[in-house]
Amino acid sequence: MTLNTVSLRFLAWVWVLALLASANAYSQTDTASEGHPARTLVIASHPYPERSVVNKALQQVVQNMDGVVYRNLESLYGNDVKAIDVEAERKAYEDVDTVVYMFPVHWFNMTPMLKAYFNEVWFRWAPQALKGKKMLVVVTAAGSDSFYSRTGELGITIDEILAPMRACARFVGMSYLEPLAFLDVAGADAAKIQSYQKQLQDRLKEGGLAKPASPAKADAAANRVLVSIVLLPKDIPHFAELLAKEKATAAGWKDRGILEHLLSREDGHGVMLVLKDVSRAQAEVLVKSLPLSRYFDKVEYSPYLQQY
Ligand SMILES: Cc1cc2nc3c(=O)[nH]c(=O)nc-3n(C[C@H](O)[C@H](O)[C@H](O)COP(=O)(O)O)c2cc1C
């Protein structure tokens, strides 16, 4: 075996390990593994992760904080309510004093997997095990502040929508913290999503529930997203004009420091982008804003860790 073959195999292994590590990060992470005791457990749920923008961005915040054990129900179990590993879920509460439940409001309710989780994991266990812990609910909803007000269309507030969560907390002796509700989230642009991320990070930091990751860890996790775009293989009307606008948009991203690399095929039928310091959700918003986006045949996003 030549040295080149050995080093190629080694690199392939490093690559596979990095991929495995990043894939796992989406379902479960324990950011307390470097000697800090885990204090906050985050249970995230979204029935349509492939369509999620806002929750995905919020989930990224907690995954990058120290002192958080993160579990994503759909990443772990899909939408199979019977697949929940009750023992593993109960174990995740060890050494935790605050639990964050994070989900979108769908039909004025929690998600199906979260409801199943309470049925399976909490049943005949929670009142003894969770007494004295704190509960923080983080939700997103399309309804606005005025919609969720006494004088709104339904006369129902977001606190009332979350009454089952408050009741669960009180029933098992947890203290129910003021929820963090992001309302009117439909069509949120990259700046708004960034402000939601900051609000969540500040809330966790100020409440002493978690810390932003150490600079080294933040660097390692520096949000780079590799985007591969394939254009529809057909004639696009006004292609030259749209391409010029596309290039101007990309130049703007370059100026803002969020576009690290852009590689395009010579025939103009595809590009690869490396976006920097953006979450995947923000990358999706950015890519959808491109003038040619309606002609994209295939777009793939992958988390990307720079090795050299
Ligand atoms: C099936 C479904 C039901 C929804 N029901 C509600 C609702 O009852 N109240 C509301 O304010 N928004 C509702 N929405 C909007 C979602 O709350 C909103 O799209 C979500 O919070 C955005 O987060 P995401 O980008 O992570 O999906 C609903 C959306 C879907 C897909």
Image (tube, rainbow, N blue to C red):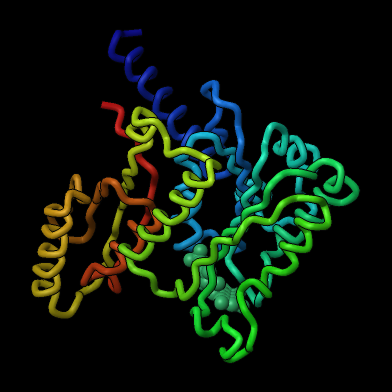
Residue depicted at 31% across the width and 43% down the height: 224
Q: In the drawing, does residue 14 fall left or right of residue 240?
A: right
Residue depicted at 82% across the width and 52% down the height: 172
Which picture quadrant has residue 93? top right
The spot of residue 41 in percent (x, y) is: 63, 42
Q: Closest to the observer: 265 or 222? A: 222
The spot of residue 227 in percent (x, y) is: 31, 52
The spot of residue 26 in percent (x, y) is: 52, 44
Quarter placement of the N terminus: top left
In the rendered view, tell whether residue 205 sits above or below residue 13: below
In the rendered view, tell whether residue 115 sits above or below residue 226: below
Q: How many marks?
A: 0
Q: In the drawing, does residue 114 fall left or right of residue 307?
A: right
Q: Quadrant of ligand 1?
A: bottom right
Quarter placement of the C terminus: top left
Q: Closest to the observer: 70 or 100? A: 100
Residue depicted at 66% across the width and 76% down the height: 108
Q: Closest to the observer: 63 or 246? A: 63
**Residue 51 in view, yes or no:** no
Residue depicted at 70% across the width and 37% down the height: 92
**Residue 161 in view, yes or no:** yes
Q: Residue furthest right?
A: 124
Q: In the drawing, does residue 186 fall left or right of residue 113?
A: left
Q: Closest to the observer: 297 or 164? A: 164
In the rendered view, tell whether residue 290 sits above or below residue 31: below
Q: In the drawing, does residue 171 fall left or right of residue 102?
A: right
Which picture quadrant has residue 281? bottom left
The spot of residue 46 in percent (x, y) is: 59, 60
